[in-house]
Amino acid sequence: RRPGSVEERRAGAPGILIAPSGLSITDPCLRLAFAGTGPGDVWLMGIVPGTLDSGLTLSPRVAAAVPRAAEAVMDVLSQMMPRVRAAS
């Protein structure tokens, strides 16, 4: 995994890891699904950091990857729209 690379994961799919903060999206999704109120699809889009040091700015590699990540989000949304329209 190279710093600055864009990664896409579906919640519950293999490869969803707990973040360095200790938070995981999988736990709340499982709880909501068990309660019968979970979302149908949960996608995570992220950028691999070069470092996990704290700070208020993005590294140059991560900053350069933001437009690619935004484009990837738009691609996922455009793929989902036909299913959303069909369900309504």
Image: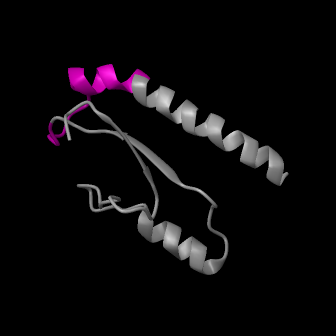
Residue 68, picture quadrant: top left
Q: Is residue 83 magenta?
A: no
In the rendered image, residue 80, in percent from the top left (x then y), is placed at 66, 43
Residue drawn at point x = 59 percent, y = 73 percent? 33
Q: Is residue 63 left or right of residue 88?
A: left
Instruction: Using the image, determine if residue 79 lies above or below residue 62.
Output: below
Residue 58 visible from this viewpoint: no
Residue drawn at point x = 73 percent, y = 48 percent? 83
Q: Is residue 57 left or right of residue 88?
A: left
Which quadrant does the N terminus fall into? top left
Residue 72 visible from this viewpoint: yes
Residue 5, picture quadrant: top left
Give the colouring mode of the picture: one colour
- Name the foreground residue: 18 vs 58: 18
Residue with the most extreme bottom position: 34
Question: How many callouts does the rendering have?
Answer: 0
In the rendered image, residue 9, in percent from the top left (x then y), is placed at 42, 50
In the rendered image, residue 48, in percent from the top left (x then y), is placed at 26, 39
- Name the foreground residue: 74 vs 23: 74
Instruction: Using the image, determine if residue 56 lies above or below residue 14.
Output: above
Q: Is residue 64 magenta?
A: yes
Residue with the most extreme right position: 88
Residue drawn at point x = 82 percent, y = 49 percent? 86
- Name the foreground residue: 4 vs 53: 4
Instruction: Using the image, determine if residue 64 lies above or below residue 79.
Output: above
**Residue range corresponding to the magenta coloring:** 51-67
